[in-house]
Image: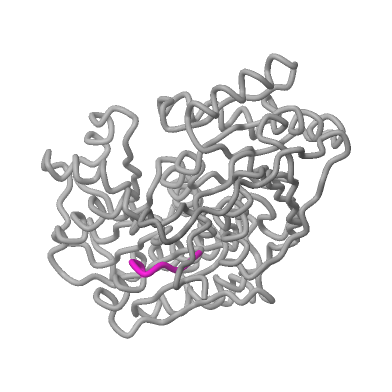
């Protein structure tokens, strides 16, 4: 289905064409008409399937029709990077509309990690579409720089993450501050009990858009898992980078310290690696991400939180140096590669200590990948013995029987 066939304003239609968007993805074909109709909905689709344009285009069209007034649209996202990414898509459409001497909505993005004062200046007089992280939005509300009285359109991007424990409190404070029930759309790569509960209480007769795997434009993704000793991971990563000629690889680790430590080890061996985590300033994160995209860094070592919203076209390789906490996080990590139909590879390191946790992740995904052993990196450690489960301690994560595993 071509974008030209959607019932949208000619200036917006021309803007979309000018940005080389011609054929809508499956998620866009299903979402855009439902959003234009003014109903609530939930989109569950993989990262990279085109969700951002699926909601930005209807928001701008509603503005063109006069159904979205000043201060009418709020887009909530979990991270600075995703806020900037969404704002860039909107800016591209709005700028293209203005280039045709057409009217266009006023948009802005606000997020933490940078000075709040320039953002307050941009918000003077109000904006039509505001992209925000919950924490910074609450700061702006407290300073009377933003009012939510007129919000008629609410988009919750990466809703599964915003309803996680680390974001949920601030997110719900924002929802409570809304004065009326807006048209609401949730977008996520996965489901969660918290998301489903929010959906049942805050959405009215929602339309569900669930992208079936057969219609997914992305997964030419190869998944591999390599079993090795914990102290072999760094040298194994160096070997893989060298022998495969990787020039752009995203490596996931468990903590800021691990990101810094691994980057130092690789850089000492003349591999151009840099850490990327929440402890950096926004300016540092923006610069390093752009340098990675431009090929100045070969390896970007990141944590789950910092990597949210990273959109790198044609990223070929993702490595799980440390396993993610859950199968949901594994899916989000995998979504960084294989975007927009490109091929991608996800490689996970599994040690004796993390084998039980890896098995839980596979079970949650209903997959069974073969454990590979690299020549020269044969593991010599064996998994620790299973703990006794009747000693009152409850066992350990990944080895304790759970009703969810039945």
Task: Give yes or no for residue 39 being in the magenta stretch.
Answer: no
Q: In this view of the protein, which residue sits in the foreground, 38 or 166?
A: 166
Q: Residue furthest top?
A: 268
Q: Is residue 113 left or right of residue 228?
A: left
Tell me where residue 205 sits by quadrant. bottom left
Residue 156, image x and y in percent?
A: 36, 61
Figure colour scheme: one colour
Q: Is residue 382 left or right of residue 160?
A: right
Residue 393, image x and y in percent?
A: 37, 53
Q: How many marks?
A: 0
Any part of residue 104 in sight: no
Question: Which residue: 24% across, 70% down?
Answer: 182
Question: Which residue: 71% across, 39% down?
Answer: 381
Any part of residue 380 in sight: yes
Vertical position of residue 364 compared to residue 257: above or below: below
Vertical position of residue 23 compared to residue 149: above or below: below
Give, as a single range, the part of the protein colored magenta.
190-195
Residue 228, image x and y in percent?
A: 73, 40
Vertical position of residue 142 compared to residue 96: above or below: above
Question: Which residue: 54% across, 59% down?
Answer: 327
Q: In this view of the protein, which residue sits in the foreground, 373 or 285?
A: 373
Residue 138, image x and y in percent?
A: 19, 45
Vertical position of residue 302 compared to residue 151: above or below: above
Q: Residue furthest bottom?
A: 205
Question: Which residue: 47% across, 24% down?
Answer: 284
Task: Give yes or no for residue 192 being in the magenta stretch.
Answer: yes
Tell me where residue 299 sits by quadrant. top right
Q: In this view of the protein, which residue sits in the foreground, 203 or 253?
A: 253
């Amino acid at each position: 289905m071509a974008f030209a066939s959607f019932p949208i304003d000619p200036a917006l239609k021309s803007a979309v064409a000018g940005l080389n968007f011609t054929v809508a993805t499956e998620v866009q074909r299903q979402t855009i008409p439902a959003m234009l109709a003014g109903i609530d909905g939930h989109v569950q689709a993989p990262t990279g399937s085109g969700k951002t344009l699926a909601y930005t285009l209807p928001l701008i069209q509603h503005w063109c029709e006069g159904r979205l007034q000043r201060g009418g649209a709020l887009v909530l996202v979990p991270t600075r990077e995703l806020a900037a990414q969404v704002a860039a898509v909107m800016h591209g459409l709005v700028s293209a509309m203005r280039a045709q001497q057409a009217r266009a909505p006023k948009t802005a993005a606000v997020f933490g990690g940078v000075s709040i004062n320039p953002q307050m200046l941009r918000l003077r007089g109000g904006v039509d579409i505001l992209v925000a992280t919950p924490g910074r939005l609450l700061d702006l509300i407290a300073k009377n720089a933003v009012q939510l009285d007129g919000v008629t359109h609410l988009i919750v991007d990466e809703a599964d993450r915003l309803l996680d424990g680390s974001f949920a409190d601030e997110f719900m404070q924002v929802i409570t501050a809304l004065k009326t029930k807006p048209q609401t759309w949730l977008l996520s790569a996965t489901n969660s009990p918290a998301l489903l509960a929010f959906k049942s209480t805050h959405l009215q007769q929602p339309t569900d858009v669930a992208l079936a795997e057969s219609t997914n434009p992305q997964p030419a993704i190869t998944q591999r898992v390599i079993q090795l000793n914990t102290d072999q991971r760094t040298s194994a990563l160096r070997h893989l980078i060298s022998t495969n000629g990787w020039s752009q690889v995203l490596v996931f680790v468990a903590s800021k310290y691990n990101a810094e430590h691994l980057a130092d080890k690789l850089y000492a061996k003349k591999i151009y690696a840099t850490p990327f985590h929440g402890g950096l300033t926004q300016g540092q994160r923006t610069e390093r991400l752009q340098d990675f995209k431009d090929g100045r860094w070969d390896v970007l070592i990141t944590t789950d939180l910092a990597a949210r919203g990273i959109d790198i076209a044609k990223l070929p390789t993702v490595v799980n140096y440390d396993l993610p906490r859950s199968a949901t996080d594994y899916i989000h990590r995998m979504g960084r590669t294989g975007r927009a139909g490109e091929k991608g590879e996800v490689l996970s390191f599994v040690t004796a200590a993390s084998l039980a946790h890896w098995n839980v992740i596979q079970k949650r995904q209903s997959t069974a990948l073969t454990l590979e052993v690299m020549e020269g990196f044969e593991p010599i450690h064996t998994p620790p013995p299973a703990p006794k489960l009747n000693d009152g301690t409850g066992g350990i994560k990944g080895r304790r029987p759970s009703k969810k595993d039945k």
